[in-house]
């Protein structure tokens, strides 16, 4: 997907907050072989690498635009490469992913697949947004189903593959994982108005729609903005962003 790093960074502080909660779940040990799935523009991967002494960290992303930005953070212990997180290869002491696995389908298969790529004693630590039932998401899906967008999109809808916390806990248990931690947390954000909410989702959830809409992108956004202004007329707007975090270890 053609990501826009500048738009994504518009709310950088708000997007970074869950990263620190995820980082707190990591069992800090030296000399780890680490992969950061969906590393994006690399700033947070740099912080992950700085936290892990004498470790070798690889940032993986499928966006050349994001990796162009990430390149400046490369060091002798941190490299970035283009790749698909859902076809991960190799064996890793830590598989880390902050706000990226939601772009890969079928988590019931994906999580066990990733778990198999942990070395004995290795850890998986993941954060995914679970905000797909928020009003803003309901409105853009509703709009995509209306004409002329339904025809332009060919009926396309992108439904979140994110599971419930109970389902992630069960998946990890069925993998034979130890020290399972799974929880959901709301990160309260205060945005200027409903237009700011639309701008937020424009940097993430709307990206696969934009790449299919061509010249109708602005019209699509205009309809969404109009609906959002009617649904959320207040200013400022309280935006409760719901996220799931989980961690588990593979037995030795």
Image (cartoon, rainbow, N blue to C red):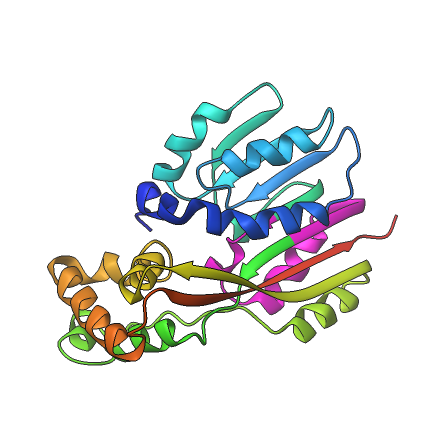
Q: Which of 92 and 144 is in front in this view?
A: 144
Q: Which residue lies furthest to the front in this view?
A: 235
Position of 178 with respect to 12 (left or right) is right
Residue 191: quarter of image? bottom left
Residue 213: quarter of image? bottom left
Percent coordinates x, y for residue 95 in the rendering: 66, 46
In the picture shown, does residue 101 fall above or below 56? below
Position of 68 with respect to 50 (left or right) is left
Q: Which residue is drawn at 66% across and 45% down?
A: 23
Residue 197: quarter of image? bottom left
Q: Residue furthest top?
A: 76
Q: Residue furthest right?
A: 252
Q: Which residue is drawn at 48% across and 69% down?
A: 131
Residue 239 in the magenta stretch? The answer is no
Q: Is residue 155 visible?
A: no
Q: Residue at x 77, y 38 (%)?
A: 28
Percent coordinates x, y for residue 246 in the rendering: 68, 59
Q: Which residue is drawn at 13% across and 76% down?
A: 148
Query: What segment is highlighted magenta in the picture?
Result: 97-125
In the picture shown, does residue 81 fall above or below 100? above
Q: Nearer the viewer, residue 144 or 118?
A: 144
Percent coordinates x, y for residue 26 in the rendering: 73, 45
């Amino acid at each position: 997907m053609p990501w826009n790093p500048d738009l994504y960074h518009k709310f950088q502080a708000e997007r970074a907050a869950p990263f620190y909660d995820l980082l707190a779940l990591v069992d800090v040990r030296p000399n780890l072989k680490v992969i950061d799935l969906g590393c994006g523009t690399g700033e947070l991967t740099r912080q992950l690498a700085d936290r892990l002494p004498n470790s070798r960290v690889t940032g993986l992303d499928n966006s050349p635009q994001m990796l162009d930005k990430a390149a400046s953070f490369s060091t002798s212990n941190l490299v970035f490469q283009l790749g698909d997180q859902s076809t991960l290869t190799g064996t890793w002491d830590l598989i880390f992913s902050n706000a990226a696995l939601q772009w890969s389908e079928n988590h019931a298969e994906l999580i066990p697949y990733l778990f198999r790529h942990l070395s004995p004693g290795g850890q998986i630590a993941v954060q995914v947004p679970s905000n797909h039932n928020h009003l803003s998401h309901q409105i853009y899906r509703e709009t995509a189903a209306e004409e002329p967008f339904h025809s332009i999109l060919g009926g396309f809808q992108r439904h979140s593959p994110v599971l419930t916390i109970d389902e992630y806990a069960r998946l990890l248990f069925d993998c034979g994982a130890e020290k399972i931690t799974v929880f959901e947390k709301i990160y309260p954000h205060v945005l200027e108005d409903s237009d700011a909410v639309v701008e937020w989702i424009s940097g993430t959830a709307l990206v696969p729609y934009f790449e299919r809409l061509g010249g109708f992108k602005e019209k699509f956004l205009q309809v969404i903005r109009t609906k959002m202004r009617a649904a959320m007329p207040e200013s400022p707007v309280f935006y409760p962003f719901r996220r799931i975090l989980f961690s588990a270890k593979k037995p030795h």
